[in-house]
Image: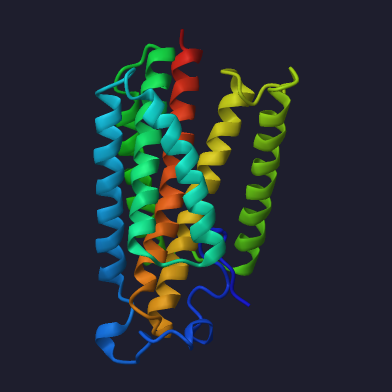
Amino acid sequence: MYRSGNPALNDLTFEKSAYKEVSWWEDSESNLMSMNGVVDKTALLLTIVTLTAIAVYLTVPISLFLSLLGAIVGFVVALIIIFSGSMNPILICTYAACQGLFLGGITWIIEYQYNAPGLGIVAAVLTFLILGVMLSIYRAGLISWNKNMQIAVTSSMVAILLIYLVSFIGSFVGFEVPLIHGNGAVGIAFSVFVVGIASLCLVADFDFIERGVERGAPKQLEWRAAFGLLVTLIWLYLEILKLLAKLVASNR
């Protein structure tokens, strides 16, 4: 059984049997998922994220409330999409808009906290640079999403999630996971590790999308695939932003 490391793309996402009752399933080529279709929809979602992020960033602090609202609503919408298996373009575009609101606010906060204007732009450039590099490596056949990598990346993701969860809960009782959030060598190394895992998740997304195209998945699943890729890219951006902030602080 094939499985992606991305929670937005599970085992049944591209299985024809999971959609046999859906009226829009046809085997004609025009109704089949394509790589270009996924690229177009991903580009649209990234445009929505970028525009809403810029709108919030340029109107802070007035718009900080919108950033908080975007974080909450975006999280809820993401859970709905993931657990319902939704491919609704309106719902997925709503997620993109909410995440843009959140990213615009959190980027401004980090830049202000570390007195590092332009940090968000650098993080965005690095995010797309890593996307391009990982796609090139994948297309060249230098890396593949095999079972060993799947186990390693998934295990690492679970460990990272547990660390973040413990850290979040601990913040309410005065407990903090030692070193990883600091600006020292351990904290920077941890952030580099997380960025690396997020980058490898892109490989899982590429592979999953490619398999969907090969299997003749329905065209509506292009939205689902674009959503899954967007989730990974947003995570990667946030981790790069945190890494850059640590590097700035460590040099002062």
For the point 49% across and 52% down, the residue is 78
Q: Residue 59: name its quadrant.
A: top left
Coloring applied to the structure: rainbow
**Quadrant where the N terminus lies?**
bottom right
- In front of the other: 108 or 91: 91
Q: Residue furthest bottom?
A: 27
x and y, in percent, of residue 100 in the image: 34, 39
**Count of numbered tags:** 0
State the residue at coordinates (46%, 66%): 86
Above or below residue 186? Residue 25 is below
Position of residue 101 relative to residue 77, above or below, is: above
Toward the top, the furthest residue is: 252
**Image side of residue 200 versus residue 230, left or right:** right
Near-viewer residue (172 or 167): 172
On the picture, is 160 further left or further right than 120?
right
| Residue 64 shows in the view | yes
Image x and y of residue 103, in percent: 38, 34
Q: Position of residue 71 (x, y in %)?
A: 46, 37
Residue 148 coordinates in the image, percent (x, y): 65, 64
Residue drawn at the location 41% of the way across and 37% of the way down: 70
Q: Is residue 26 left or right of residue 113?
A: left
Q: What residue sits 24% from the left and 39% below the top?
A: 51
Can see residue 235? no
Q: Is residue 164 left or right of residue 141?
A: right
